[in-house]
Amino acid sequence: MRPLGEEQTTATSPVGEETTATSPVGEETTAIRPVGEETTAIRPVGDQTTAITRSLSFGSEAAAYERGRPSYPPEAIDWLLPRGARAVLDLGAGTGKLTTRLVERGLSVVAVDPIPEMLEVLRHSLPDTPALLGTAEEIPLPDASVDVVLVAQAWHWFDPMRAVPEVARVLRPGGRLGLVWNTRDERMGWVRDLGRIIGAEHDPLSREVTLPESFADLQREQVEWTSYLTPQALIDLVASRSYCITSPTEVRTRTLDEVRELLATHPALANSTGLALPYVTVCIRATLAS
Ligand SMILES: C[S@@+](CC[C@H](N)C(=O)[O-])C[C@H]1O[C@@H](n2cnc3c(N)ncnc32)[C@H](O)[C@@H]1O
C-alpha cells in the first residue's frame, strides 16, 4: 500500500461537495478507505446505510444536477488521460458531465452508473455513447477491455475493497485509473459564505487515496479554474447535492432559502445575472502494472 503524498494526513478525508464534515446536516463520510486495511474500513451499519442511500440519491434531482453541476477543465482531463488512450470507461458517469468532454475528444467511451434517471439524461445528450447500468463493485464490462477508467466526483461513493479489483479487472495491463473532484475554492468571500450554508469544502491538499501495489506511479495534480453560472444554476447545484436530496423537507427548504438570501444580499452577488465560481480540481492518477 502506498499512501499518496508525504504531506498528507493519515485521516481519510471527505471529498468535494458530497462529503463535507462541517455540513449543517451533519454529513460525514469516510468513503475513501485504505484498500486491504481493515482498521478504517469498518463503519457502523447505520453509517453505511446512510452512505449508500446518499450515494444512490441523485436520481430524483438528475435534471437539476445536469443544470447546476460544473464540468471539468481540459487541463485536468489532459493530465488524467495517457497518451494514445482510445477506450475509456467513465465510471459513476451520472448525467455525463465528464463523458461529454471525453466524447468530444473522439475517444471511445462507455458510461456506467447505477441510477437509471442519471443515465437517461446522459443518453439524451449522448445517444451514441453506450450507457450501462452498473456499479464500480460489479462493472458490466469484460476483462482487460479498456485503456482508462475515469471516475469523476464519485470515487468516494465506492466500496474500494470491491471496486479496486474490478477496476483492475477491466483495465488492460498498463492501463490508467484517473480520479477527479471539483472542490469549490473557498478563499473567495461569497464562496466561503456559501460553504457556511451548504457545508465547507475540505482542503484539496488533504485528499488521500491508497491503492494496492498493482497500481504504480500514484500521482496528484490540481487545476484552478472558474465556472460561470447563473444564480438559478447555483440553486440547482445545491439542490442536487446528496445531503440536500436526502434531508427532511424543512432542512432542504431552509438551505435553499439561505442560498437565495445569499444571492440577494451578498455585495458581490446582489443583482448579478452571472456568477463566477472558482474551483480547485483535484486529480489523481495511477497505472496498472503491465
Ligand atoms: C456526484 S455524482 C458524479 C456524476 C458524474 N461523474 C459527474 O462528474 O457529474 C456521483 C455518481 O456516482 C454514482 N455512484 C454512486 N455509487 C456508485 C457505485 N457504487 N458505483 C458506480 N457509481 C456510483 C451515482 O449514481 C452518481 O451518478
Image (cartoon, rainbow, N blue to C red):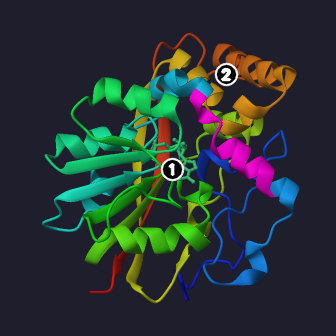
Give the quarter of the image for residue 171.
bottom left
Could you say which is closer to the camera, residue 123 or residue 21?
123
Name which residue lies at 66% across and 56% down.
Answer: 202
- Residue 198, horizontal then vertical, whole percent: 72, 36
Specify the label residue 266 is tagged with: 2
Q: Is residue 73 visible?
A: no
Q: Which residue is mark 1?
A: 153
Name which residue lies at 32% across and 55% down.
Answer: 89
Q: How many numbered marks, from 0 up?
A: 2
Q: Residues within 10 Å of mark 2 (few under 14, many from 20)?
A: few
215 to 85, vertically: above or below: below
Q: Horizontal placement of 181 versus 81: left or right? A: right
Name which residue lies at 67% across and 78% down.
Answer: 9
Three-letter code, disc 2: His
Could you say which is closer to the camera, residue 210 or residue 160?
160
238 to 15, vertically: above or below: above
Q: Horizontal placement of 115 versus 169: left or right? A: right
- Residue 141, horizontal then vertical, whole percent: 35, 58
In which quadrant will I find the C terminus? bottom left
Closer mark to the observer between disc 1 and disc 2? 1
Q: Residues within 10 Å of mark 1 (few under 14, many from 20)?
A: many
In the image as oriented, which residue stretches furthest toward the top? 271
129 to 281, vertically: above or below: above
Tell me the element at label 2: loop
- Residue 259, horizontal then vertical, whole percent: 70, 23
Provide the major secondary structure of the magenta segment: helix
In which quadrant will I find the N terminus? bottom right
**How far apart in space, not on screen, are marks 1 and 2 (Cα)?**
28 Å
Could you say which is closer to the camera, residue 188 or residue 246?
246
Q: Is residue 192 visible?
A: yes
